[in-house]
Structures are given as C-alpha cells and as structure tokens.
Image (cartoon, rainbow, N blue to C red):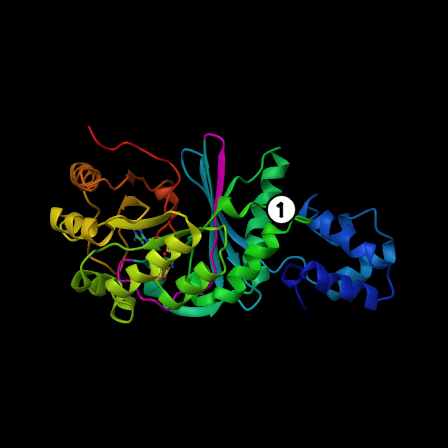
Amino acid sequence: MPSFFDLTLDNLTQLVTAWGEPSFRAKQIWQAVYRDLAPSPEEITTLPKPLRERLKAELTFGSLTPMADAKSLDGQTRKLLFRLPDGKSIEAVLMGYRRRRTTCISTQAGCAMGCVFCATGQMGFKRHLSAGEIVEQVMWFARELKGGDDRLTNIVVMGMGEPFHNYEATMAAVDLLNDPEGFNFGARRITISTVGLVPMIERFAAERRQVNLAVSLHAATDKLRTELLPINRKYPLAVLFEAVRKYTATTKRRVTFEWALIQGKNDTPEQARAFAGLAAGLPCHVNVIPLNPTRAYAGQATTRERAAAFKAALESRGIPCTIRVRRGIDIQAGCGQLAVEEQVTLQS
Ligand code: SAH
Ligand code: SF4
C-alpha cells in the first residue's frame, strides 16, 4: 500500500479529486497530518467519515513499527528502533539539551560506504529508505513531543546511512518537511552530513538549498583518510575540498567538518596542521567528538587532554572548533555514531 508520507500535496490533491472529492479536502488532510500531527485518518474528525475510511483503506500512515525504545540515564536522549515493512530496521534518536529538541534520522538501512569505525558501515548496505520513511521518523518524534507540549527545534540527518547516496529521497523528505503549507520546518534548522560524495555536494551547492551541510572528514591526509573512509580513494581530499569550496562560494554558507578523534590516529598535531592547510581561508567550523568505540574496530576514543590539544591546535590557526560529547552512550544512541548537540568544554 502506498504511504501517505511519500506524497506531495499535489499528489494528494490528484488522488482525492480522482476519488470525486473537492480539492480543498487535500489541504485539509495535509494540514491535519503535518500541522495538527494527527497520527491517522480516523483522528481527522473534520473529514466526512467515508473519506476517512477511504484514506485508511488506500494509504498507510505508519510504515514504522517501534521495536525498542530506550531512554538514557539522564533522560535527555531517547533512541527508537523501528522495523520497516520489509522487516529491516533503522534507528532514530531524539536529544534534548536546554530548549533544543533535536532528532537524528536515518536515510538508509545500513550503509555502503564502509567507514571502518562506524557501526552502520560495519553492517553493510541493506537498502535505501523512501522519502516517506525518512519523513515518518521526524513525524513520530514530533507527535511524541506534542504530547508533552513540546516541539522539535532541529533535525540532523546523521543516523544510519549516507544521505547523498540516497539523494533524491533525502531531498524529497527535506522538501516535504519544509513545506510551508504543512510541517513548515525551516531548512536552516536541518543539517545533512555526508561522507563526501563529491558529485552530490556539487549538486547540493547548485540547488542552493538553505539546509546546513556537514562533511565527515576525520583525517586531513589521503593515506589516513583512505584507511578510515574507503570512499576517499574515489574522492580524495583535493577533489573533496574543491567541491566544498565551490559549495561555500556558491551558497555563501559555512561548512561544518566532523572529526571523530581516535587515540593516536587522527588526534595528532600533524593532522591538525594538515587540516589547517587544506582549510585555509575556507568558512568552516570543526566538530570534534571522541570516537564511540564499536565492535569491529580496535581504535579507542581520544583522551580529554588530546581532544583539548587538537582543538587548541586548530584554533591557534584561526579555525573554530567545538568538542562535542556523545550523549546517551549508555543506550548506544550513536546509531553507532551520532554527532551530538550538547556542547561541552572538556578541557581543564
Ligand atoms: N553517512 C553520513 C551521516 C551518518 S554518520 C556521514 O558519514 O557523514 C554521522 C556521523 O557520525 C559522521 O560524521 C560519522 O563519521 C560519525 N561516526 C560514525 N561512526 C562513529 C563512531 N564510532 N564514533 C564517532 N563518530 C562516528
Ligand atoms: Fe556510512 Fe556515514 Fe557510517 Fe561512513 S560514517 S559508514 S558514510 S553512515
């Protein structure tokens, strides 16, 4: 059965008019689902009953089945494991920090990129998610929060999968979430993280989207980056930085680099220096985060001292850097990996 969340408002309008309904019904349904957060057509009581029944019979409003729901000890992070209709599973996380409510969502079941330290990479690629499956993760948390009279403030596309490997569905999801007639979630409060698929960075830049871009860098020399992120063989640093520079020049926006610090590997002064060379004059910001150790990778998290030294090495060269901590580590909230909202000063 087709999913409601794969439809645009135009698609929905075509559908309901084909059923012989007036077109205003489409907008009414759209707003009930995306603004009032009705979880299913039965709850849209302003609709005539036969229309509610037809919607229920012809569209699915829930293709995600929650299988596990874990809360971190501090109560600030919640991780959901969802089963998809074909039995595959994905994870999505909700993080609270002060007034921020950030959801971290997945774009694929598994991932084909094989980054050695990443839990999702270690499981391999299962399949792409549809736009609707991506949107539904957000709606699920939006409804939950509404129950507590709260709302989402940020979306990070940093869960399972490589969003630029599933570009069309990811952008369709962004457009759906963005729709001013519907959920109306500001593009500037959405961040997409990519491992560095150059052609898609170029496309993203050309589309001049207002969505924030983060690039998972993790190393500033080709030898080390290829060892950690095999995709670097295909898109080495020179090519990647050319695309990133094009992005910042076209969009006049800053780019964020993600850097998981692995003890003795990529947390060295040499790496910091090499990065400063690559990023000279580039409007950017670096988020470093101690590695979240995973089963199939022997590397360990850096220490506080080394993280602070790495940050200082970047800052002394004029590159802003934030040390982030992994919240909800007790519930494996990382999807193996999540970059985290809480900004913590680990030094001193
Ligand atoms: N595929 C995209 C988005 C999902 S991964 C990407 O790679 O950017 C989200 C972030 O978590 C990436 O920066 C990724 O490199 C990082 N990450 C993955 N595994 C990690 C781990 N074990 N510890 C710390 N960060 C990790
Ligand atoms: Fe895929 Fe990102 Fe994990 Fe690399 S870090 S394997 S791109 S999810």
Q: Quadrant of the N terminus?
A: bottom right
> Residue 242 lies in what quarter of the image?
bottom left
The boundaries of the magenta stretch are 98-117
Q: Residue at x 19, y 41 (%)?
A: 317
Q: Horizontally, is 224 left or right of 69 in the view?
A: left
Q: Residues within 10 Å of mark 1 (few under 14, many from 20)?
A: some
* Residue annotated with mark 1: 184
x, y percentage for residue 23? 82, 59
Magenta span has 159?
A: no
Q: Which quarter of the frame holds ligand 2? A: bottom left
Image position, residue 255 (x, y; %): 36, 49
Residue 166 vertical position relative to residue 210 in the rendered view, above or below: below
Question: In terms of image quadrants, where is residue 239?
Answer: bottom left
Magenta span dominant secondary structure: loop
Give the camera-side residue of 216 and 121: 216
Q: Is residue 78 above or below residue 41?
A: above
The quarter of the rendered structure image containing the C terminus is top left
- Across and down, in percent, residue 301 comes to 22, 47
Q: Secondary structure at mark 1?
A: loop
Q: Is residue 291 visible?
A: no
The residue positioned 77% from the left and 66% from the top of the image is 15
Kindly identify the residue that appears in the image at 55 percent across and 55 percent down: 174
Q: Can residue 115 be seen in this snapshot?
A: yes
Location of residue 11 (image quadrant): bottom right
Q: Amino acid at mark 1?
A: Asn
Q: Nearer the viewer, residue 45 or 260?
A: 260
